[in-house]
Each structure stands twice: as C-alpha cells, then as structure tokens.
Amino acid sequence: MHSSETKAGESLKPWKNLISPLSNFIFISPIFMKGLLAICFFTAFSICCFSVLPSWKPPVPCPECDRILIYESHHESINSGPEEKTNFSHVLFGIGGSAATWSTRRQYCELWWRPGTHRGFVWLDKKPAKGDGPWLATSPPYKVSADTTRFKYTCSYGTRSAVRIARIIKESFELGLDNVRWFVMGDDDTVFFTENLVNVLNKYDHNQMYYIGGNSESVEQDLTHSYTMGYGGGGFAVSYPLAAALVRILDGCIDRYADFYGSDQKIGGCMSEIGVPLTKEDGFHQIDIRGSPYGLLSAHPLAPLVTLHHLDYVQPLFPGTNRVDSVKKLMNGGYKSDPSRVLQHTFGYDPMRNWSVSISWGYSVQLYPFLVTGKDLSTPLQTFVTWRTWSKEPFTFNTRVLNLGICERPIIFYFDGVKELGNGTTLTWYRRQNSHPMRRCNWENYAAAHLVKGFNVSAALLDPQEWRKAPRRQCSEIMNAADNVDGTIGVRIRDCSPWESVTPK
C-alpha cells in the first residue's frame, strides 16, 4: 500500500486495478467514480425490469369499461348534492314498437306523452317509411334498434321481435344520458298515468336495485310465462343500479333463454340470475282479459292507477265511445283533476232505504236497491273472461259472478264531468246508462231507485303521500238521501274515523 493512500482510497483498490491503463492519461476522482457506478446500476436495473414486461399493445375497446364509467358518473352526480324527489326528468321511457304498427298504436302513446316534459324513445325495427309522412312532434322521438340476428330464438309460437325489444333497456342505458334514476319499459299501446308512476317510484330508493311491475290478470298466462316477472305490456320500472347489472348479462340471458316467448320473460330470467325479485304494484295493469274491463275498474285495488294495456282487445271503458276516446275521457276528466284518486273505490249505504252505493271515482257509481256486504262490493264483478282461452276462470284476484237476474244487477251511472270547487275539493257527477231494465222489477225499492237520475260526489284532493301510509279505503256518506227532489243523490267521500266501519245498520 502506498503511503499516500487513505482509508477511503483503500475501498477503490479493485476499481483502480481495472482502470489503471487509463490513469496514465487522465485523473479519475473518487466522486466521479461513484456517480459512474450509480448510472451503471440504474441502467442495468431498468433493462432487467423492462425485459420481463409484456410488449406494449394499443388499448382494446371495452364496452364494459364504458358502462362502469357511466355507472360511476351516475353515482358521483347523485351524491354531489342534496337529494331531490324523483320527477319526470329522472325517468327514461323505453317503448317497444315497430314501423308497421306505429301508425295505429301512436294514438295511445300520444294520450300520455308530454313533449318537453317526458324523456324517452320509441324503439322501432327500422326507420318509418317515407310515405308515412314526417314524425309527429306529439309522439315520443324514435330510435332504430340494433341488429339482433346473431341471437338465438327458439320459441315455436313467438316472434323474434322479442329479442330486439328485450334489448331496449340495454340500448337505453348505453345512451349514457345524465340524471336517469329509472328505466321504464312499456309497449306502444301501453297507456301510462305518469303522475302516479312517479309517485309510486318515489316510494323506493332509486340507489338500490328495484324491479317494479305487475303480473297478468289471467292465471293461465302466469302459469305459461311467469308469476315472478313484470309483464312488459303493463309496464315495469328498473332502477339505475339494477339496470347497470342487467346490461352486463342481458345478451347472454337472451341466448340462455332462447325458448322464452316474450322480451319481458327473458328480462325476468336475467333478474333471477341477478337475484332481484319483482316488487309488485297493483296499479300496473296488463289487462290480460277479454270482454268488458268494467268489473275490474269499478272495484280497483287500493293502489294508484299506473298503466293500462291491451285496450284494443277489450270493450271501450265508457259506453257510446270508441276505445281511444274512452281513455281520453278518463284521462282528461277525473285523472287530470285528481291523479291520485282516479278509480279509487269506496262504498257506503243509505240506511233509510236500504240501498248500497259503490263508487269508482272518476269512472262509475253502482246503485244497488238492496243491502250488499262490504266483501261483495269490494270484489270485482266478472264482466270479462280469460285472455287466452276465453274461459270464465281463473284470475289472480277474486271475482263476483254477474248474476243473470236483471233485478239483482246494479244500476250503473258513468262519469259525466268534474269541477274543482276552489278549496281543494272536487265535485264529480255521474249519469245513468242502463235505466230501462229496471222497469221489469216491481219491488218498491227498485221503483224508487229508477227515479234516481245521477250522483254528485264531492271529495278533497287525495294527497299522493297517502300511498306511503298503510292502505285503507276511504268512507262515503249519503248527503241528501231523504229529500231527493231533482233525482240526484249527493255523496261525500272522506277519511274514515279511527273506529269507523261501513257496516250497514
């Protein structure tokens, strides 16, 4: 060791041997050597790391990632401020239609659609023909569904359109529209009562997975298809989080359930895989019946009216009108004045004459010139038969046989008008339709009942919040039963007192 070397220099002995030939020409400082070593070490480390990484490739398109981004964006928006009640702007309608049927079906859709207020699209199989004229502003805007020929469909008695219509909810979701809480599906002949729809949806947390709708009225249909699905014609609603989960597996479901008849049945199969049951609401009406819907609508369940379907397959709601005009009369009359109350059923008695009075608000009044039990009055008269086989039974609710004895039938008074009294109260009036058959009945009660020309019914506006409470039918009382001078009976509908019963005296 040279006497001039320090302890620090001793540590460089091996390296000095390696660079000794260069030392004849330049001086290498210890600091420079340490920097050189650091650079070499970093270079070697980088080469090792990058040698084990896969080669870079361009990113592959990821529709699933797009859906995740849409879903995350949705949740960021709903959590960014105070929550507001669900309104029309939060609902996106997906209406199943076709270019061939739209010209006749649009009249139903235009009864409820409000341009500029409602959001959604009619999904067609192709663009409307040029000969059909321009698309009307009174109709929902349309979109053309994607091609579905790659999907399987093996149901021998159905049509492939079920595949296309099943995918409407997926195509609606992938539009990525903002501020959507609910996807509501229906057919082009489904009539929505949208104020009541929104009130029903407000009962549920749209941040949870909800699947809301109703079943068929005919048991044979539920047995053939399912009791656990929301029937598409009657309409159903899917919350945003559930839609996000549904669109991930929907295409696979369509192939797995290729033998299922309808689009709603395929979606119901998907819901079973996700594990979300149908939340049933009695106001969604598939109307899987034939004949007259009168019995069903005159004893409506204790639930807001949300939808009506299959109106082309039943008699008009009101006598003396066509099908479309009869629905228009219901919507522009009682529903427009008091949406929550339309078709709500109540009944009471005239104890002086032993009469029974049954009221379907905004639709009809039944007068029985004898006492009828509350159980019978709350049970629909069977004015219809089953959907597929036109049989007398069975249905998913109890029915009361429409007795052929003419003197045992009610005298029916149909809705004729409504007036708002200005103090949160409405007055509706009803006029007799079937007066002549009563002349065959010689009972004293029938003779007096035959003189009745109509009913005037007053009621306070029904607060939509009532539907969030435990359901209870309201009470009605006869106001001028004894001195019926002009042939019109006055009735007042009101809340029942806590211990009140409508039991006849």
Image (spheres, rainbow, N blue to C red):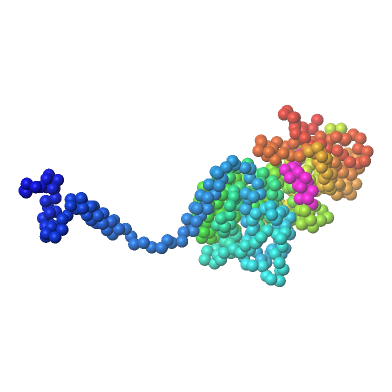
Identified at 72% across, 29% down, the residue is 498
Residue at the top extreme, as displayed = 499
Identified at 73% across, 45% down, the residue is 339
Q: Is residue 487 left or right of residue 192?
A: right
Please tell me which residue lies in front, 258 or 456.
456
- Residue 282 lies within the magenta run: no
Whole-percent x and y of residue 385?
A: 71, 53
- Residue 337 lies within the magenta run: yes
Whole-percent x and y of residue 349?
A: 81, 35
Q: Quadrant of the C terminus?
A: top right
Identified at 11% across, 45% down, the residue is 6
Q: Quadrant of residue 458?
A: top right
**Residue 214 visible in rendering:** yes
Query: Magenta residues?
Result: 329-349
Please tell me which residue lies in front, 380 or 65.
65
**Residue 220 visible in rendering:** no
Q: Is residue 292 left or right of residue 92?
A: right
Q: Quadrant of residue 369?
A: top right
Does residue 423 lie above or below 63 as drawn? above
Identified at 80% across, 39% down, the residue is 425
